[in-house]
Image: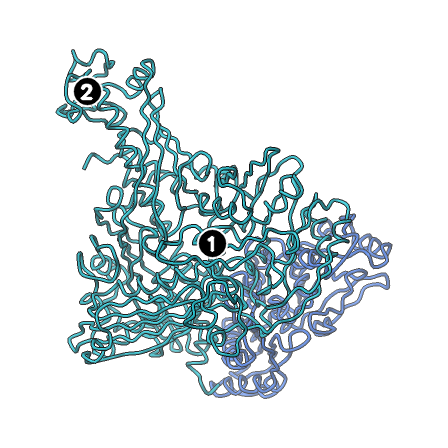
Chain colours: A blue, B cyan
């Protein structure tokens, strides 16, 4: 039962407030998942620590080489951001797909990641962007690579009763780079993805240089389609190579069947075409400049 | 026809401002001093016997005021749906349910109920009830439930001897000689179709507040669509005379779509049972999950069509069969298969027809009424076979339908005549709107997409006869200031009747709508009415009000005629003024008092003056309307334009057009709302909505998150077209309008999918997964 709801003014204060509650306090960053989980008894807390009063947390910041998204930045802010539309169009598309407008106005991108759901839209889109998370706790500040944020299926490495992810950062788009996000869904709003794919490519002379290809839900957090990534490295951009990447991703994918979100067979069946579409969209973004 | 001043106009809804500003009251808003909150313990098992139940810890919890189980609940068998009270005289009622029973028959069945001072205490008390179950074999599938080894759900409680687990009786509609007709046909097509469980998902969940007075008078605020029948059902459940029970809405009901024709789930009975024990008001509001798993769904069904036609496209024989899974309790399980047969057979002029249909008990949530009431299931099957027949004959589906659709006074299987149809005009206008002539040359938006168009046609009813008891009444009072009060037993559940019935009253009587008030949805202040369902409210209650208005008008004419020095037939009433009928321009006529009109024959007298004139002479104009409605078929079409992503199975509906012949559209804006809402529900039925079960009999789709209602973003461009006819049996020519819109959309979308993909989808919903599986059988 929540007894207290606090708005610290600095990150240090927030960390101290969590520490003094010795595990009985929790960060709330939006709360569109947390409140439901608390009502269902899955999570309990005596105190909720809301980060919105901390200066800077609610901003998308452009640095020389990177962009950072503060802990209180909502999905709606991302959707409206022209900066991100240019540097991370897949992330914008992913955020537009979350919940409904009311939910997007409240739900935060960092919360979407820390919740730990492997197929969370924003998380899958960020996973291909070489993103890092800035984590603060009593021990200090650390930067953790995105793929180290997951401890298991729907389990985050972040302990929200003592740690705060203050921002997620990723490099700005460089010449020849492009990214994308694709999801399969049962309806256009208020639906979790049946599966999703994100991709980032660097294209030089019509060849794939760096390729990031991620898919979910196939494990703890978004998973790299490693064999497909390796296969594409240095290959020409051809229909055949793109198709082959889809086939390789399928061989690696280990979907499970869900009575609500689709069968394993269907997810495996449409994964190749989702991979193809993600790659084509990322290539188009790269060629657009 | 007298000048229509209100009927046919899109006047603003009377409930509009209150509903859009949050002032309108619903049952779930009600609160009373000392009111308790009820919570229900529900079965986790699909079929089990309660070996022991210990409520002592719950009873001791501070704040708990009443606990009810099968040990202390009422022991009268009932049917929670309206057939308990509205079964026609040639059928036997199926009474198969106790409020609490020692056998639980589906996951969600009621085991115990608690009333406590807060919801949290009631919830906590549930966790303190100790129940020991003996698991019984469960059966989920209808076919399996009819097999020899299946467990019997309701032995000795009104099952037909013709088959196992079949409640009531098997419905047969014979017409002509179907075997002969099929033999004489040049082409015969047979196909079976599978329809899913879908839910009404009305906005307000099942709710009731029950209050018992010191003298034993019972008041129940309720979300029911049928206040008067619900009063009768409660009376029989508890053995209380109906005259001591008042059922009402406060005054609005947050939607229905058929889910509470009879009791609202069991909310009224649970609240009343606990209120009788606790001697305090008790409120029972279903959670959305409870609404999903423990109140009626649409019947899932298997429908088989065998259609025979001559080479020239003339339909010659139709053999139809429908098996409906009615779940744990019968509800409408006897009536609904009959409506499916009758409505599906009534679309086309076919000399040889036969229908066989029935329900089957299984260990699932009970199925019951949902907008369309069996008609969408049959329509989906027949309308796809009609398209298959068109393909087989090399005809266009449009021309084939046009050749065979019912015309005025054509013979059919229904016990009332078809006196109006503008179906052909509906087809014409809808096809023009969607661009049907381009069907053969449609272009998809991408190489991996295919596009198609489909259509479907159908009919429905304008009241419940001959499937249920149906008659109606109205009170009509001209008050001493000349304004009018009307009382009708129907509730306002969002369909706009508290506006449209006043439009009918205004024109039937001859007075402005603003001078009429309406009592509705309350058994104490209104005469008996069977409720708001079967697309009947405007039609049947409207007829009763019209008759009452005409009676009151005649009383006034009798009263004023001597003052005008004419006979009663020679006066008229319009816009609140009485004048001699020969008056050329009543609007421009001067106003005089009744005592002076003899000297001023070219003048008019106000109702206000007449009513007061009568009042001070000890007279008031009061009338009743008492009608037995005939019935009339509304007609409707839906056209769909779809695009299918062949690589993923995903469907984009590009356009939906519906055209409806609802007779006279009493309020066209409300009719358009009815069409649009139903078409969107049909879109969900076609593509996304479905409740499934796991092997243990647990519902896998039991909340808004998993149940895929279309969202605002999913709704495609839509057009609603009203094609008016004039049905001689309805008030001012009106017919039913509430349900039609949900009958054809799934059929039309399925035909469009077949047109796009050359694959016939026989199972709903046509999810990307099902479409992908058919497009890529190797994957």
| The quarter of the displayed image where residue B302 is located | bottom left
Q: Residue at x 52, y 66 (%)?
A: B154
Out of A190 and B129, give the one closest to the viewer: B129
Label 1 neighbourhood size at 10 Å, few (<14), some (14-19), many (20+)?
Answer: many
* Residue wearing tag 1: B81
**Vertical placement of residue A59 versus A141, above or below:** above
Q: Say what secondary structure mark 2 lies in.
A: helix
Mark count: 2
Q: Chain of mark 1?
A: B
Q: Chain of mark 2?
A: B
Relative height, residue A184 to residue B655 (above, below): below
A79 or B71, which lies in front?
A: B71
Disc 1 from disc 2: Cα separation? 49 Å
Which mark is nearer the camera, 1 or 2?
1
The answer to whether residue A179 shows anywhere in this view is: no
- Residues beneath discs 1 and 2 located on the same chain: yes
For mark 2, what is the residue?
A: B561
């Amino acid at each position: 039962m929540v007894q207290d709801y606090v708005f610290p003014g600095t990150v240090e204060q927030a960390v101290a407030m969590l520490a003094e509650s010795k595990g009985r306090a929790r960060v709330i960053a939006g709360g569109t998942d947390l409140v439901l989980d608390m009502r269902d008894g899955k999570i309990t807390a005596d105190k909720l620590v809301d980060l919105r009063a901390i200066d800077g947390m609610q901003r998308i910041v452009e640095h020389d080489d990177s962009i950072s998204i503060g802990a209180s930045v909502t999905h709606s802010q991302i959707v409206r951001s022209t900066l991100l539309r240019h540097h991370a169009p897949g992330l914008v598309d992913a955020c537009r797909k979350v919940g409904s407008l009311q939910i997007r106005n409240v739900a935060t991108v960092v919360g979407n990641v820390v919740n730990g759901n492997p197929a969370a839209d924003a998380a899958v889109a960020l996973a291909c962007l070489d993103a890092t998370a800035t984590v603060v706790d009593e021990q200090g500040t650390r930067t953790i690579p995105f793929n180290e944020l997951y401890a298991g299926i729907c389990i985050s490495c972040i302990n929200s009763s003592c740690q705060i992810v203050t921002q997620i950062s990723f490099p700005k788009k460089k010449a020849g780079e492009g990214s994308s996000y694709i999801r399969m869904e049962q309806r256009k709003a208020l639906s979790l993805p049946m599966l999703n794919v994100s991709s980032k490519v660097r294209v030089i002379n019509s060849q794939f240089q760096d390729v990031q290809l991620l898919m979910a839900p196939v494990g703890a957090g978004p998973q790299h389609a490693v064999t497909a990534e390796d296969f594409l490295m240095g290959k020409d951009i051809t229909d055949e190579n793109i198709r082959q990447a889809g086939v390789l991703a399928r061989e690696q994918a280990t979907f499970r069947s869900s009575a609500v979100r689709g069968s394993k067979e269907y997810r495996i069946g449409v994964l190749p075409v989702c991979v193809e579409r993600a790659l084509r969209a990322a290539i188009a973004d790269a060629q657009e400049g | 026809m007298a000048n229509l001043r209100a009927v046919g106009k899109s006047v603003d809804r009377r409930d509009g401002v209150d509903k859009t500003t949050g002032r309108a009251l619903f049952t779930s808003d009600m609160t009373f001093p000392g009111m308790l909150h009820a919570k229900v313990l529900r079965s986790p098992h699909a079929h089990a016997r309660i070996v022991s139940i210990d409520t002592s810890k719950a009873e001791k919890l501070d704040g708990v005021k009443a606990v009810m189980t099968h040990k202390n609940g009422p022991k009268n068998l009932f049917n929670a749906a309206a057939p308990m009270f509205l079964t026609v005289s040639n059928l036997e009622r199926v009474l198969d349910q106790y409020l609490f029973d020692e056998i639980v028959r589906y996951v969600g069945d009621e085991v115990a109920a608690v009333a406590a001072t807060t919801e949290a205490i009631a919830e906590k008390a549930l966790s303190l009830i100790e129940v020991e179950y003996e698991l019984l074999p469960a059966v989920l599938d209808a076919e399996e439930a009819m097999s020899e080894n299946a467990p019997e759900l309701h032995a000795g409680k009104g099952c037909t001897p013709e088959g196992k687990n079949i409640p009531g009786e098997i419905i047969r509609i014979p017409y002509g000689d179907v075997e002969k007709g099929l033999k004489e046909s040049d082409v015969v097509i047979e196909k079976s179709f599978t329809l899913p469980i879908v839910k009404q998902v009305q906005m307000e969940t099942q709710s009731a507040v029950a209050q018992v007075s010191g003298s034993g008078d019972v008041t129940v605020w309720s979300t029911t669509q049928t206040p008067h029948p619900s009063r009768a059902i409660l009376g029989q459940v508890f053995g209380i005379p109906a005259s001591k029970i008042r059922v009402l809405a406060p005054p609005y009901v947050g939607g229905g779509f058929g889910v509470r024709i009879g009791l609202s789930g069991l909310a009224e009975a649970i609240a009343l049972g606990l209120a009788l024990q606790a001697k305090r008001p008790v409120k029972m509001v279903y959670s959305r999950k409870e609404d999903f798993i423990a109140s009626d769904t649409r019947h899932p069904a298997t429908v088989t069509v065998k259609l025979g036609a001559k080479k020239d496209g003339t339909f010659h024989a139709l053999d139809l069969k429908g098996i409906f899974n009615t779940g744990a309790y019968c509800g409408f399980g006897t009536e609904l298969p009959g409506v499916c047969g009758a409505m599906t057979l009534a679309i086309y002029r076919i000399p040889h027809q036969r229908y066989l249909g029935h329900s089957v008990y299984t260990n699932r949530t009970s199925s019951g009424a949902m907008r369309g009431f069996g008609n969408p299931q049959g329509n989906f099957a027949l309308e796809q076979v009609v398209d298959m027949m068109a393909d087989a004959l090399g005809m266009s589906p449009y021309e084939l339908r046009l050749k065979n659709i019912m015309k005025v006074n054509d013979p059919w299987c229904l016990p009332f005549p078809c006196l109006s149809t503008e179906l052909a005009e509906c087809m014409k206008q809808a096809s023009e709107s969607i661009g049907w002539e381009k069907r053969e040359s449609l272009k998809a938006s991408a190489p991996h997409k295919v596009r198609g168009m489909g259509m479907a046609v159908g009919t429905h009813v304008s009241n419940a006869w001959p499937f249920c008891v149906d008659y109606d009444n109205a009170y009509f009072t001209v008050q001493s200031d000349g304004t009018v009060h009307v009382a009708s037993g129907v509730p306002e559940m969002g369909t706009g009747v508290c506006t449209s019935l006043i439009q009918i009253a205004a024109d039937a009587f001859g007075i402005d709508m603003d001078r009429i008030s309406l009592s509705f949805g309350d058994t104490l202040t209104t005469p008996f009415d069977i409720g708001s369902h079967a697309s009947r409210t405007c039609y049947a209650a409207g007829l009763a009000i019209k008759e009452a208005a005409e009676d009151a008008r005649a009383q006034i004419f009798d009263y004023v005629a001597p003052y005008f020095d004419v006979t009663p037939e020679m006066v008229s009433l319009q816009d609140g003024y009485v004048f001699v009928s020969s008056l050329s321009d009543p609007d421009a006529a001067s106003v005089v008092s009744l005592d002076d009109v003899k000297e001023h024959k070219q003048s008019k007298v106000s109702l206000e003056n007449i009513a007061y004139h009568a009042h001070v002479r000890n007279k008031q104009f009061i009338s009743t309307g008492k009608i037995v409605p005939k019935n009339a078929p509304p007609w409707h079409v839906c056209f769909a334009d779809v695009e299918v992503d062949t690589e993923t199975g995903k469907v984009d509906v590009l356009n939906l057009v519906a055209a409806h012949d609802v007779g006279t559209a009493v309020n066209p804006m409300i009719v358009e709302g009815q069409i649009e809402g139903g078409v969107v529900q049909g879109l969900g039925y076609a593509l996304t909505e479905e409740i499934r079960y796991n092997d243990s009999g647990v519902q896998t789709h039991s909340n808004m998150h998993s149940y895929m209602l279309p969202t605002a973003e999913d709704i495609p461009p839509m057009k609603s077209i009203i094609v008016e006819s004039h049905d001689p049996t309805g008030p001012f020519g009106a017919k039913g309008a509430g349900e039609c819109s949900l009958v054809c959309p799934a059929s039309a979308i399925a035909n469009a999918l077949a047109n796009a993909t050359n694959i016939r989808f026989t199972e709903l919903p046509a999810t990307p997964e099902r479409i992908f599986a058919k497009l890529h059988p190797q994957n």
